Structures are given as structure tokens and as C-alpha cells.
Amino acid sequence: MIARRTVLSLAAVSFSALVFASPACAQFAKPEDAVRYRQSVFVVMGAHMGRLGAMAQGKIPFDARAARHSAQVVETMARLPWEGLTPATESLESHAKPELFRNMDDVERLVEALNVETAKLPAAAGSLDTLRTQVGATGKACKACHDKYRQKI
């Protein structure tokens, strides 16, 4: 029963991502909406990566079901924030450094690297050893972009 609920929940999230992410640019009435959208995605993604990281570091007990759920959320969320990364948002206050908008080819490369790593998370969530390895690899992919293009506010 729980497995079925998880599958249905993930199907709903995936369907929502497909339906709503593609026209996301059109849904932003104002550039501020795009910033809020991408920041919201990163908050959710960060919360689930935090749970996975805590398990990987032994700060909380490993729970394969919870790990798999968080891994699936991270995988889905990692594909979403880029719709809100529009040139119209460059001058707005956010965590994005101005040079991000001048290096979109590099950003796209980093996003693809992130998506490759996040796609491996759900399968890795089955055991603590594989989770540790993949959380580390995924964290490095996140950090690569943060180091270049994220500022602290």
C-alpha cells in the first residue's frame, strides 16, 4: 500500500513537473515571480538533500524508504528551477551572481552535470553505502555551481 502511494505520489509530481515546468516562463507575470519560483524549488531541494546528507553522515538513522522518497524529490526538483532563470531577473536581488547570466553555456553544462548525478540518487538510496557515495557526488555537482554563481545575501 505504501509503495503504491509512493508511486502515485511520484507520478503526480512528475506529471506536474512536465505540465507546469515547460510553460513556466509564460507563467511569470513579473520577473520577481521567476525569482520566487526558482528560490522555492531550491528550498525544497535543499531540505531533501539535507535529509539525505544527514543519513549519509550518520546524524539521523538511515531509512531506505525516506531516503528513496527524498532522492526522488531531489531528482525531480533539480530539473525545475532553470525556467525561472531568465535575463529579466538579472538585476533583481537573489543569490545569483551577475556573471551567471553572462555564462549561460557554462551554467547549462553545470546543470546537466547536476541532473546526471541527481538521476542516480533514487537507485543509490537502497543502501547506506551507496547513498553516501551518491550524496557526495551530487553535493559536488551542487557545489560546482554554487562556488561559481551563487552569492551569499
Image: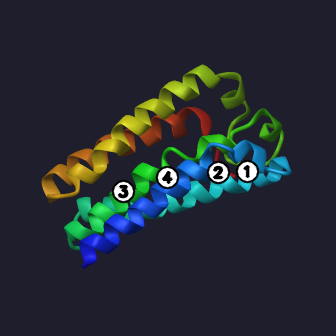
Badge 3: few (under 14), some or many (20 or more) residues near its Cα, within 10 Å?
Answer: many
Specify which label sits upstream in the sequence, 4 or 2: 2
Which residue is disc 3 drawn over?
72
Badge 4: few (under 14), some or many (20 or more) residues near its Cα, within 10 Å?
Answer: many
Which residue type carries mark 2? Answer: Arg
Which residue is disc 1 drawn over?
35
Spatial CA distance of label 1 from label 3 is: 24 Å
Which residue type carries mark 1? Answer: Val
Q: Residue at x 83, y 39 (%)?
A: 91
Which residue is disc 2 drawn over?
38
Q: Secondary structure at mark 2?
A: helix
Q: Quadrant of the N terminus?
A: bottom left
Spatial CA distance of label 3 from label 2 is: 18 Å
Q: Position of residue 130 (x, y in %)?
A: 17, 50
Badge 2: few (under 14), some or many (20 or more) residues near its Cα, within 10 Å?
Answer: some
Q: Which mark is residue 77?
A: 4
Can residue 17 be seen in the rendering of this structure?
A: yes
Q: Secondary structure at mark 3?
A: helix
Which residue type carries mark 4? Answer: Met
Q: Which mark is residue 98?
A: none
- Residue 5 relative to residue 28: left or right: left
Q: Looking at the image, do the residues carrying marks 1 and 2 touch, with CB atoms under 8 Å apart?
A: yes
- Residue 15 relative to residue 30: left or right: left
Q: Nearer the viewer, residue 47 or 73?
A: 73
